[in-house]
């Protein structure tokens, strides 16, 4: 990554992570759980959300990474299984929404006039699609595992919870062997082409 790419990527990274975590907290708060608010997570301030290791991973891979998980207390929800699923889904959906917003200049042919924005928009779209897809992988502690747990019968959801202690090890293995990129990159490119309309 050269200096110009780095300077473009940093604000996109901070915005994308902050939007993702804010979305988790906002939906939890709306569903009756004040925990994110009490922990200061209903904020778009990146300092409230950054995880040092996850941010470095995202900075260097430019495809996947993570922030500090937003704390929630499912006991405050009227329907814990369903509401936890909705809270988990909010983060990836917020990144897809941000990617769609950033793609609008391409959709409406505005980018020819503002060509200096091309690197910013393209990096932002790729980054947010990558974040969404990475977090939808059903391996704990990613959002996808909580979404899957909300869809499974209770007995299988419990077994998935037991599996959680190994999730980080599996993710690290996939990351360092290149397996994660092989899973994510084709999907990112597919969704990018669909969103931008290529």
Image (cartoon, rainbow, N blue to C red):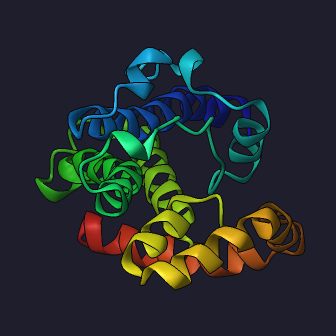
Above-or-below relation of 36 to 96: above
Left or right of 182 on screen, residue 169: right
Q: Is residue 92 left or right of residue 113?
A: right
Residue 54 appears at what percent x and percent y?
Answer: 72, 42
Residue drawn 44% across and 16% down? 38
Disc count in the image?
Answer: 0
| Residue 138 vertical placement versus 60 (above, below) | below
Coordinates of residue 119 in the picture (x, y in percent)? 47, 43
Frontmost residue, 195 versus 35: 35
Q: Is residue 124 left or right of residue 68?
A: left
Tell me the residue at 52%/83% (across/down): 155
- Observer able to see residue 15: yes
Quadrant of the image occupied by residue 190: bottom left
Q: Nearer the viewer, residue 136 or 8?
A: 136
Q: Nearer the viewer, residue 109 or 157?
A: 157
**Residue at the spot x=56%, y=71% of the render?**
137
Residue drawn at 48 percent across, 72 percent down? 149
Q: Position of residue 153 (x, y in %)?
A: 42, 84
Task: Return the residue nearer the eye: 48 or 198.
Answer: 48
Quadrant containing the N terminus is top right
In the picture, the quarter occupied by the C terminus is bottom left
Task: State whether residue 43 appears in this view.
Answer: no
Asked if 150 appears above or below 45 in the picture, the reply is below
Q: Establish if 131 lies above or below 26.
A: below
* Residue 46 x/y as whole percent: 53, 21
Lateral position of residue 42 relative to residue 155, left or right: left
């Amino acid at each position: 990554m050269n200096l110009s790419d780095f300077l473009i990527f940093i604000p996109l990274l901070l915005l994308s992570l902050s939007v993702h975590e804010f979305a988790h907290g906002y939906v939890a708060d709306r569903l009756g759980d004040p925990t994110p608010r009490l922990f200061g997570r209903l904020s778009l301030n990146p300092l409230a959300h950054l995880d040092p290791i996850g941010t470095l991973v995202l900075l260097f891979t430019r495809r996947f990474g993570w922030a500090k998980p937003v704390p929630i207390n499912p006991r405050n929800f009227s329907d814990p299984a369903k509401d936890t699923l909705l809270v988990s889904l909010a983060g990836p959906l917020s990144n897809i929404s941000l990617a769609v917003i950033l793609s609008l200049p391409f959709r409406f042919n505005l980018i020819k006039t503002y060509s200096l924005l091309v690197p910013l928009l393209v990096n932002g779209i790729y980054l947010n699609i990558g974040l969404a897809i990475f977090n939808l992988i059903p391996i704990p502690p990613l959002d996808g595992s909580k979404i899957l747990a909300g869809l499974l019968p209770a007995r299988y959801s419990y077994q998935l919870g037991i599996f959680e202690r190994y999730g980080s090890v599996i993710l690290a293995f996939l990351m360092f062997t290149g397996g994660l990129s092989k899973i994510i990159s084709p999907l990112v490119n597919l969704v990018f082409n669909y969103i931008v309309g290529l």
